[in-house]
Image (tube, coloured by chain):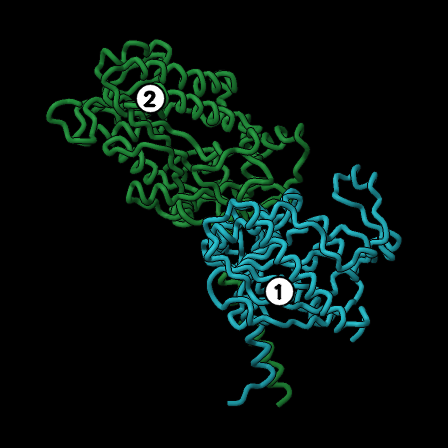
Chain colours: A cyan, B green
Amino acid sequence: MPDRPGDQWDRRVANGLAFLRRRLAGDYEVDEFGFDPELTDAVFHPLLRLLYRDWFRTEVSGVEHVPVDGPALVVGNHSGTVALDALILSAALHDKHPAHRYLRLLGADLVFRMPVVSEIARKTGGTVACNPDAERLLGGGDLVGVFPEGFKGIGKLYADRYKLQRFGRGGFVSAALRTGTPIVPVAIVGGEEIYPMLADIKPLARLLKLPYFPVTPTFPWLGPLGMVPLPSKWLIEFCPPIPTAHLTDSADDPLVVFNLADQVRETIQQTLHSLLERRPDPFGP
Amino acid sequence: MTPGSTPGAPGVVVVTGVGRYLGAHVAARLAADPRIERVIGVDAPEPGAEFTDLLDRVERIRVDPGSLGGLLADLEVDAVVHLALVSAPDQQHGGRSAMKDQNVIGTMQLLAACQRAPRLRKLVVRSSTAAYGVSFRDPAVFTEETEPREVPRGGFGRDILDVEGYVRGFRRRRADVTATVLRFAPFIGSTADTTLTRYFAQPFVPTVFGRDPRLQFLHFDDALEVLHRSIVEDHPGTYNVAGPGVLSLSQAIRRAGRVAVPVLEPGLSGAAALARSMGFGGYGLDQVDLFVHGRVVDTTRLEQEYGFTPRSTAAAFDDFIRAHHGGVVLSRGQLAAAEQLVLDGIRQVRAAVRERTL
């Protein structure tokens, strides 16, 4: 019998109900970091898919540089006032990668201080950016995503767009070296235009204990409407992996760590420039 | 070592805290082991008649830990198992100050007595995963090497840090004694009665809004097994003891068929009041911290050293659910029935529509 549209809907309803029952009965697994793959697949990734595919028209290239199995440390540039780029990167990578791998993001401890936000971060596979967690994930063969610029990256003004900030102490490099994990640099273009930050009200930021308080063309003037990201055009390019297996003994050698961090930084910066040339209009098709 | 005794297994064992559930069970199990000649249970002076059946083969001494002094030497004790820790203040018996007296001062006095016991060659101390403290910068999984970043707010957590500090000092002074520190995850099981089992036994379970902590449990029988092996075998060092795997609090509540009631997390000052409304009495901050931060430990070292893996957190929790099916609000059967009802309903509507259109 051919598939009638009714059968398809029946199946969807049945699947939806079964999902609801499993959730309400607690019949699912979370890993030791709190990652809930079922919830990520069923709720968070579909929402992000709407955003990266339809709203930002994201083009992804170089996915073949991300290994099909085994650990890798994906290092990207950070931008956009709120760290939406990390979420977009993880959803796009999961969809485009042949093995549909999950990117385990490392987030600032501020993320884990906030109620609700902290739980969403954990359930989607994130954890606190610290070396024990990074090394544990990499040791378990996971794909780990890190943004070494941190708040310096997302909190920079629109005038400084696509200028990579300082990479801190290079903790991400030592984590990769200690586990012999390849580093995959990734350049993300498009994040800088979603909430162009024109000014930073520092006293207000200090009052609210935030790293910065942004003023964008729409925020805070339009209130909650100012939270809608501008529909910029996004390009994501994964660069060839940098192997580290031969440097395992130099994990605490600052010279090796800084050199490698610089190499990653340069690769991302150059890839950003070439991507920007491919995208003359930030809000183009 | 007593001549003729099995290598590893001590002849005379002293167990503290036999007036409580864990101590009584450990002492009874040791007394049933033929390799051990004599089990002496030490307990606070006030009698508690609950465990007399269990302890019929255990010699009992009722003294304050302070007057234990020369007793350990006189009894020619080979091993001491220190279990007399209180995890929650008992308002009828002196509250928090009595709890601290027993945990901190009691351990200090016991360790002083142990130091003067010439035959002693083994010390096993009960600790807790609360030793890792709580901080938002904590790694997701604690190994035995993780140092606490912040001192916990709760009394029990602070006591545990003190207790472990004293054991470190004891190790330095008596390097000839095999000292084992066991950091236990919260106990659960079909028979165990703890603050946490009482919490999950309520039909409506209060949680902290916006927080879904990762929890680990240890089955009570596995705790007994690890304690027993620590005494009859030699396992120096500090070990995390927990069921592998993780349950999030919301998941545990759903598996138990209970309903979560999120409560707004108040500031520091309101936390104690919240704890009271959560039904923990004075337990307070230890529990609130656990329900905000969660706590997961790595048990690789235990599994390698003991050759024993406790049953998983999920399995231990299942055992608890089976024994406490009384207060279930929403059972698996009901959920499955509701699902079937909706599906049948859709099918009937669809059939009716089809009949009418034909």
Residue A170 lies, in percent from the top left, at 60, 48
Residue B293 lies, in percent from the top left, at 56, 40
Q: Chain of mark 1?
A: A
Residue B44 lies, in percent from the top left, at 36, 16
Q: Which residue is mark 1?
A: A91
Tell me the residue at 52%/50% (across/down): A175
- Of the residues shown, which amino acid type is indicated by label 1? Ala
Give the farthest residue toward the left: B4
Dot 2: what SS?
Answer: strand
Tell me the residue at 50%/27% (across/down): B156
The crowd level at tag 1 (other Cα within 10 Å; few <14, some 14-19, many 20+) is many
Q: Which residue is mark 2?
A: B16
Tell me the residue at 56%/55% (across/down): A125
Foreground pick, B241 / A271: A271
Dot 1: what SS?
Answer: helix
Give the farthest residue toward the front: A255
Give the vertical position of A150 relative to A8 (above or below): above
Foreground pick, B12 / A96: A96
Q: Using the rendered view, name the quadrant where residue B52 is placed.
A: top left
